Image (cartoon, rainbow, N blue to C red):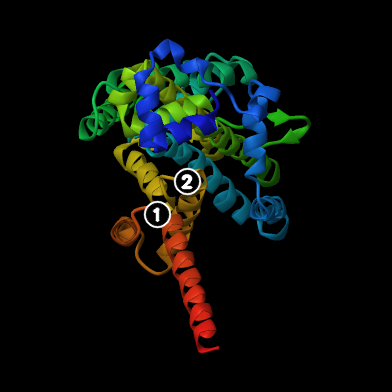
Amino acid sequence: MSAAQWRRAMNSSAAASAVAARRPTDLHAVPASPASAAAPGAWPRLSAAWSTVRWRHAVVLLALLVYPFVVSPFFTFQIGAQSLALGLIALSLTFLGGYGGMVSLAQMTVAGFAAYMLAIFGTSSNTAISLGWPWWLALAVAISLATLFSAAIGWLSVRTEGIYTIMITLAVGVAFFYLAQQNYTVFNGFQGFSRIGPPTLFGYDLHQPLPFYFIVLSCSLGGYWFVKYLIGAPFGVALQGIRDNPRRMQALGFNVTAHRVAAYAVSGFLAAVAGVLLVWYNGRISPGTVGTGAMINILIIAVLGGMKHPIGAFIGAIVFVLLQNFAIDLIDRERFNLVIGGVFLAIVLFSPDGLLGLWQSLRTRLAGRRISKHGLGRIHQ
């Protein structure tokens, strides 16, 4: 069954009733559209995802490619690379919350877990704990273990809904923070690990701002298009159906728990990749990186941009990083959280869909005014 047919089935009450009347084993008997029959498998979804590319996407991509060549290394590394890495973690939360209906406060915990695993299995300043594996092997193990860790968090939390899910993920994040802070045998306690640098890839030293920016940009673009593809795939459409009405999807034969745990695994993979990029960016990992403040910051970033749009995670990250770096020029550093809280409160009150929702509402109002003026002009004529 194609994704388009699922959307029609979920949006139309008549179609939903007809599907519910069938047995779950007959769902796959629905005839596919001619396009999907001519190109079965993933190709129709890929072509559909490619068809959504607009000229504005090309303009944004061109701006991202040109950006590091027209700004200083500070803006390339401190602003650009950091925003993209934080945006990738926020994207994992956007996928969970916006399309799965599961708000998790443990995304920064998963990213920090991947960073810790990279330091433990790879190389760092603490040679007594770090195993010194090759960077590519330590990288693969760190991302794999972080993905499994995220799936385990999902297995614990998906049987609850609403505030209980948030509290369980918060409890997991706080527990990991105190474990990392108090355990000196594996996590080196409060000091953590330092001198965790990126490798040299294809002859390019990723310590330098320009190569590091492009490796972060590549990972962020890959994560963005992966999420865009996934939400249009049968799994993503089924996940959105579970978000809207889990009981109906359960009655249709879908394993709601398995879909939710799989969504946690996908989000964990994205957060793990971003966690590796962040530890390469900072050069160190400590319990403060996975503290409560860091967990809340990811939620703020996702809400600022808009939880219903994958690109919103990166927009929120850019705004957050800019405020973090330049708000101290206007106020004291100690009052930065007050500024972030004020911006967050204003967005929640005036635009629940974040900055993208605010932009969309402004466009709608301007379009309505143009239409009304055009109509009045015709009436006077």
Mark 1 Cα-neighbour bin, 10 Å: few <14, some 14–19, many ≥20: many
Nearest to the observer: residue 339 or residue 307? 307
What amino acid type should be assigned to the residue bearing mark 2?
His
Residue at the image point whose x is 38% and y is 29% from the top: 16
Work out whether 185 lies above or below 110.
Answer: above
SS under mark 1: helix
Q: Is residue 115 visible?
A: no
Numbered tag placed on residue 280 in the rendering: none
Name the residue beneath numbered marker 1.
354
Name the residue beneath numbered marker 2.
309
Residue at the image point whose x is 42% and y is 50% from the top: 306
Q: Earlier in the sequence, mark 1 or mark 2?
A: 2
Place of residue 135 in the rendered image (x, y in percent of width and height, measured from the top left): 62, 21
Nearest to the observer: residue 181 or residue 218? 218
Left or right, 74 with respect to 343, comes to: right
Q: CA distance from mark 1 to mark 2?
A: 9 Å
Place of residue 148 in the rendered image (x, y in percent of width and height, measured from the top left): 44, 16
Q: Is residue 321 visible?
A: yes
Place of residue 247 in the rendered image (x, y in percent of width and height, measured from the top left): 28, 24
Left or right, 231 with respect to 135, comes to: left
Q: Residue furthest top?
A: 25
What amino acid type should be assigned to the residue bearing mark 1?
Gly
Q: Are marks 1 and 2 in contact (CB under 8 Å)?
A: yes
Residue at the image point whose x is 35% and y is 20% from the top: 21
